[in-house]
Image (cartoon, rainbow, N blue to C red):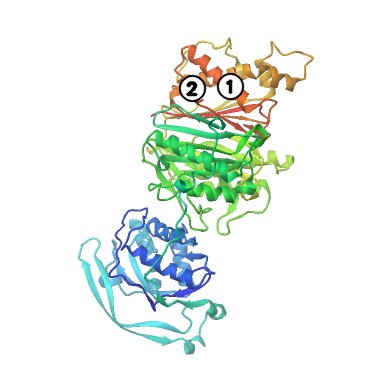
Amino acid sequence: MLGGAIVQKENTRIHKASSCNWHQKLNYMTTPGDEVEDMFILLNEVKRQIPSITAVSSGAIASDYQRLRVESVCSRLGLVSLAYLWKQDQSVLLEEMIKNGIVAITVKVAAMGLDPAKHLGKEITFLKSHLHKLKELYGINVCGEGGEYETLTLDCPLFVNARIVLDEFKIVLHSSDSIAPVGVIHPLAFHLENKEKAALSSDNDKTNDLVHEKVGSVIEVEGDCSKGSETPSQSATEITDLVEVKHERLHISRTKKDNTFSISCWLQESCQTFTALHEDLAIVLRHIESQLTRCGFGWEHVLYIHLYIADMNEFASANEMYVRFITQDKCPFGVPSRSTIELPLLQVGLGRAYIEVLVANNQSKNVLHVQSISSWAPSCIGPYSQATLHKEMLHMAGQLGLDPPTMTICSGGPAAELEQALENSEAVAKCFNCSICTSAILLTVYCSKHIPLSERLKIQDKQDSFIKHMRMLELDKASPCEVVDPISLYVLVPDLPKRAFIEVKPLLFVSKNADMANVTAHNLSSTMLPNCWGFQKAHWHDSCIQKCVINGKICAVLLSITSDIIAKICSESLGTNEDHENSIMKGHMERVSRFCIYLLDEVVMENGFSWEDTMTLRVYFPSLDMTMETLSLMFTSAFKELSEMGRRVQIGSEPMFNIVPVLGAGRSASMDDVITCELLAQKS
């Protein structure tokens, strides 16, 4: 079914000798002669004859192989893939199909417990109880999603005028395997039985009335559609000359880890020229692309992308530019996951686009990219995926409070959006056999400034109650699991996609082993580290730190610096008559930056990690009475001094941290930190 219209293709001529599934890998690439190209040719002709068609509906339930091929064709034709059966309970679906008058017989069986002599040609109504028994015994898919059986529909509510009656057939045995024999039915004779007479005694009158009302939506497509055409897309190489940029406007940061590292690029705003968001984004993407090329990498090596923009009103044009650089063809192993938020970039003197990419030097990633609209979780229509698993870390795309089947923001305000976003995140996590309530390392909650102050604290309460409830459900299951205590970070931003109040970005640990005995929040070492800059270990230091440590694998740290903490850091030099906040901004941020590096260094070293293990280091700051460049220089100077003290910190031409301007951030929904540092380290 396409966009509400049923398209009959019997009279459509497709000039192919004998199309086969030549491309048998999971992720489909355009392959001449493959049966998928027949579908492309047909739908291209359908779109030409019926321009109002915007979507294609398929019956994929659990088969990624099938779904990805439909999505590939839809993507090439600019159509939306609808898969409302996706991830639905197959037992429930089977019951609903029978209940709604679908009469289907098996025409192929190929599974343990299905005998061609006994079970071929039987209606699914007759086989229902046997299929459920086989599910219990052998774990088969009761709807045949694993190829256990194939069916032929003889009657259903959409067959308005007649039903198919199979008069004669023969059984052909393809395999006489003693455990799982394979047999198929070859129809020899059939006829159509008029339904008008039988309709008088039908118990399904309401369904028939509904179908008769929709009969005008059935359109027959005829003609020679052997010549397919695809609209050529503008490649990144064709847009590289859109805007010339002075080198001094470009800024780069990069962590120093060899195998998994982050690269960020942003522009210093120029007072002399005005550029649109998509132009700044083209410059930044092009520069990151050149950085990747210089390292011997490409977009296929990128795991995750943070897309920061200055104005969410220009998101559509920015996204058009984004998809010119990052395409399915460039990322054969899966497109990166992505989070998009608006930041106050112009207010701190930056350009209109700021990009951060997480890069891996190998392609051992597992990408989940579902473009079909379904009831499972929000679709990702375009070159960005729901989640990317790499070396036991699951990087999940930013999740809005979207109702999956309608792709609209749910009603009920910020707390309701948060709950829906967490439910969406949980649906994605389940695909990787984990849960956000037991496996999350870090939960970042982006909050729009449009959330009323009275609602912000409710967001934190809602998150805590949701995680607690889900955790109880997980721990009640038969197989016990270890629990990771996540760090929570709240970030206040000007706006989010679709004018949402909330966007959740989870980071999860997915253990390769059944047990996660290495999960701990305790220090690995009590080794006394030399004091830096005269800072002495104090009990209140612990109040600044949240951490999640997977022994020998992952170390995530959140450092929260409030005004009260700054007062303690600078207690000896703060004047009693000075305005407290202004004195912090003007006189003491240099010491605060050193304290941040000192405390992060202490936590990293005590837990058996080093700065060389750092994948990302972000410094969130609200709009202070200083430029982003000034703050960056302070942190750069602190790292140089740390290196001179003998710490293993690689100092290069680019800083290893990102300064991220925000409206507020912190470990609580009040988001009143002066500085918040987020560090993620992983052992190779």
Q: Is residue 506 visible?
A: no
* Residue sitting nearer the eye, 654 or 426: 654
State the SS at label 2. Answer: helix
**What numbered label is drawn on residue 613?**
none
The numbered mark, 2 or 1, whose residue comes first in the sequence reads 2
Side (left or right) of 12 relative to 283: left
Residue at position x 34%, y 61% in the image: 134
Q: Nearer the viewer, residue 576 or 192?
A: 576
* Residue of label 2: 604
| Residue 260 point in image, percent of width and height | 42, 33
What residue sits right under mark 1 in the picture? 633
Q: Amino acid at mark 2?
A: Val
Q: Check the image and report above or below for 252 versus 71.
A: above
Quarter holding residue 178: bottom left
- Location of residue 424 with respect to 151 vertically, above or below: above
Task: Looking at the picture, tell me which residue is in the foreground, 118 or 498.
Answer: 498
Query: Looking at the rendering, in which quadrant would you find the C terminus?
Result: top left
Badge 1 crowding class, 10 Å Cα cut-off, few under 14, some 14 to 19, many 20 or more, is some
The picture places residue 245, in percent across and down from the top left corner, at: 55, 37
Q: Residue reaching furthest bottom?
A: 197
Neighbour tally class for label 2: few under 14, some 14-19, many 20 plus, Cα within 10 Å? many
Instruction: Check disc 1 and give the amino acid type.
Output: Leu
